[in-house]
Image (spheres, rainbow, N blue to C red):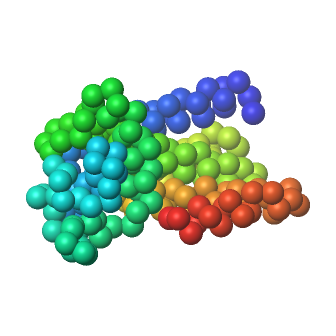
């Protein structure tokens, strides 16, 4: 890769990170993301999976009643990752709350947007197996990231973009392992696909 190509690739991926970060909506947009954020808040701030006492429970009907308590009816993986992102924020007093909220934006960024960007990096690497020049691969990754539904799901706390990103990452890892004749990392790739 030439110095010019490297600058193009780095610039494209920096711009993608910026666009992804600027599209994050810092509040629950509906029942689905409110349910997921309720699970995050329940785990970190209340030490339970029950969303009864969270600020987001009244904002969602995406919940189930089990044993006298409400729980999020959403897949647990995004909420678990969100809890890892939110725990240090909560510890320093940056708390989740309904409405426009910096903690909500940061949890969404760390759970969804970051993985969207990593998925696009994986796509860039996957396209490297085609023999395309680095600049074209970066533009194709950018076109996928900006010109598909993948970008629309980056704005909210959901599992759709996370699952798509993990599939891209796993596919790139499997393709590279096969191309190099090694099997290292294939089990981890299967785990990412399963979690997504």
State left or right for residue 32 relative to residue 58.
right
Q: Is residue 164 above or below residue 120?
A: below
Dividing the picture into quadrants, the one containing residue 20 is top left
In the image, what residue occupies the spot 67% across and 48% down?
A: 125
Dividing the picture into quadrants, the one containing residue 135 is top right
State left or right for residue 146 relative to residue 136.
left
Q: Is residue 130 above or below residue 71?
A: above
**Is residue 33 visible to us here?**
no
Observer-nearest of 129 and 37 = 37
Q: Position of residue 17 (x, y in %)?
A: 45, 36
Observer-nearest of 96 and 144 = 96
Q: Position of residue 2 (x, y in %)?
A: 74, 28
**Is residue 42 visible to us here?**
yes
In the image, what residue occupies the spot 16% across and 49% down?
A: 55
Q: Is residue 131 above or below residue 149?
A: above
Extreme residue toward the front, this view? 67
State left or right for residue 116 relative to residue 158.
right
In the image, what residue occupies the spot 21% across and 68% down?
A: 69
Which corner quadrant holds the N terminus?
A: top right
State left or right for residue 11 relative to residue 24.
right
Q: Position of residue 95 (x, y in %)?
A: 25, 35
């Amino acid at each position: 890769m030439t110095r010019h190509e490297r600058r193009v690739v780095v610039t494209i991926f920096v711009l993608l990170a910026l666009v992804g970060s600027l599209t994050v909506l810092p509040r629950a947009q509906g029942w689905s993301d409110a349910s997921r954020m309720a699970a995050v808040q329940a785990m970190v701030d209340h030490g339970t999976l029950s969303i009864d006492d969270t600020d987001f429970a009244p904002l969602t009907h995406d919940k189930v009643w089990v044993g006298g308590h409400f729980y999020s009816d959403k897949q647990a993986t995004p909420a678990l990752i969100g809890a890892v992102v939110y725990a240090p924020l909560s510890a320093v007093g940056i708390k989740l709350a309904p409405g426009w909220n910096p903690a909500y934006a940061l949890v969404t960024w760390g759970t969804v947007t970051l993985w969207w960007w990593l998925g696009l990096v994986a796509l860039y690497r996957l396209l490297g197996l085609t023999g395309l020049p680095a600049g074209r691969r970066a533009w194709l990754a950018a076109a996928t990231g900006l010109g598909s539904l993948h970008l629309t799901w980056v704005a909210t706390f959901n599992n759709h973009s996370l699952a798509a990103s993990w599939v891209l990452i796993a596919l790139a890892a499997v393709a590279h392992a096969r191309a190099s004749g090694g099997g290292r990392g294939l089990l981890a790739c299967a785990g990412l696909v399963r979690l997504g």
